[in-house]
Amino acid sequence: MSALQEAALLLQALKQRIADYDYHYYVLDAPQVSDNTYDGVFRQLLEIEQQFPELLTADSPSQRVGGSAASAFDSVQHRQAMLSLNNAFSDEELEAFDRRVREGTDQLQVEYAVEPKFDGLAITLTYEDGRFVQGATRGDGYTGENVTHNLKTIRAIPSRLNTAHPPALLEVRGEVLMLKKDFEKLNQQQAAAGAKLFANPRNAAAGSLRQLDSKITAKRPLHFFAYGLGASEGVPDLRSHAEAMQYLAGLRFPVSQLRAVKTGAQGLAEYYRDIGAQRSQLPFDIDGVVYKVNSFALQDMLGFVSRAPRWAIAHKFPAEEAVTVVEDITVQV
Ligand code: NAD
């Protein structure tokens, strides 16, 4: 068998494995493996596609976002795609990201808006003339699930914008999550009722938001953080991500107090270590930090590549808990 044929077989096996993991994670809200194991398998797939570009197909997980939106909920077409983020796992990958950004924008140094990477579930909220009219999950990035009724039960999400002159249209992007202490309490209640336990706060949040009965969601303590804008009409002139976050804070959306603006790869690395040191003390789970080119003009210059923007990256933390079962990430064919 040639190296190419072997790689094609391995790639097929990796795709099948990732499809199985995605189904359990995105559709059943019950992951089969840890995120680190998932990331390891995904990375193996990326490496093969890099080595054998002729094997790259449009249906590869490297070209797609998240899970499918096929579910019991009505579907919602996103006005603007809700994409994923590329990952960096080391300082070298972080430096390579900063280099690509500087080269792509012809800048000597670039300013980044930096935030924790909330470990929850991405949603989009649509406001028309200041009123919350629709909320949806990310789904496959283009079509999500209509979970408006469930989102209305989350107290942290404003039903009206706090302004006398609301924009005609505002889409707010953010993450629904469950605080660690609420997750512990929920699992205790589930255990007492003989019901299924959730693997972690992320799955508890996703499972709670994707309930068909809003009364169940209303009983689940869900929280929300805004981290960006989607489509809009009639918003003030915003020139940077930091300005957009300030605008959202003014409208009374919960935004992270840990957000900051940093310059260059060194500034990013410092932020990563600083947040990493605080991680176990934070009231919610984070699985990394996110760096976004601050200037919207520079973001536009960089654009997108398949499933993620070129102007942002998620710098992931190592797994928090000690792994008790050693999972084999090498796929054999
Ligand atoms: P991602 O989670 O790595 O990054 C994109 C997401 O980050 C966004 O959709 C958004 O929801 C979130 N995010 C959190 N904070 C943010 C912020 N401040 N700014 C912008 N976005 C922010 O990518 P993904 O495509 O959602 O999921 C892939 C990841 O999910 C994998 O790397 C893995 O960790 C996990 N996963 C695990 C399994 C499993 O079986 N364990 C299966 C599928 C996916």
Image (tube, grey):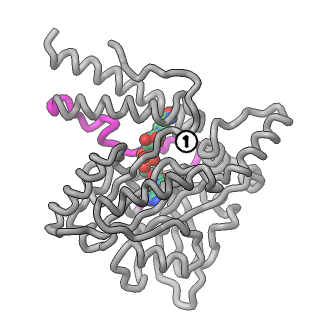
**Mark 1 crowdedness (10 Å alpha carbons): few <14, some 14-19, many ≥20:** few
From the viewer's side, name the closer residue of 69 and 230: 230
Determine the image quadrant of residue 292. Answer: bottom left
Q: Where is residue 325 drawn, in percent x and y?
A: 56, 22
Point 42% across, 30% down: residue: 19
Check if residue 263 falls in the magenta segment. Answer: no
Q: Where is residue 128 drawn, in percent x and y?
A: 52, 76
- The stretch in magenta equals 52-78
**Residue for badge 1:** 71
Point 67% across, 47% down: residue: 208
Q: Is 208 above or below relative to 163?
A: above
Check if residue 59 falls in the magenta segment. Answer: yes
Q: Secondary structure at mark 1?
A: loop
From the viewer's side, name the closer residue of 89 and 9: 89
CB at mark 1 closer than 8 A to ligand 1?
no
**Residue farthest to the bottom, as pictured:** 164
Point 47% across, 81% down: residue: 168
Q: Where is residue 11 drawn, in percent x and y?
A: 28, 24
Point 82% across, 31% down: residue: 194
Amino acid type for the residue under numbered disc 1? Ser
Dominant secondary structure (helix, strand or loop) of the stretch shown in magenta: loop
Relative to 57, 220 lies left or right: right
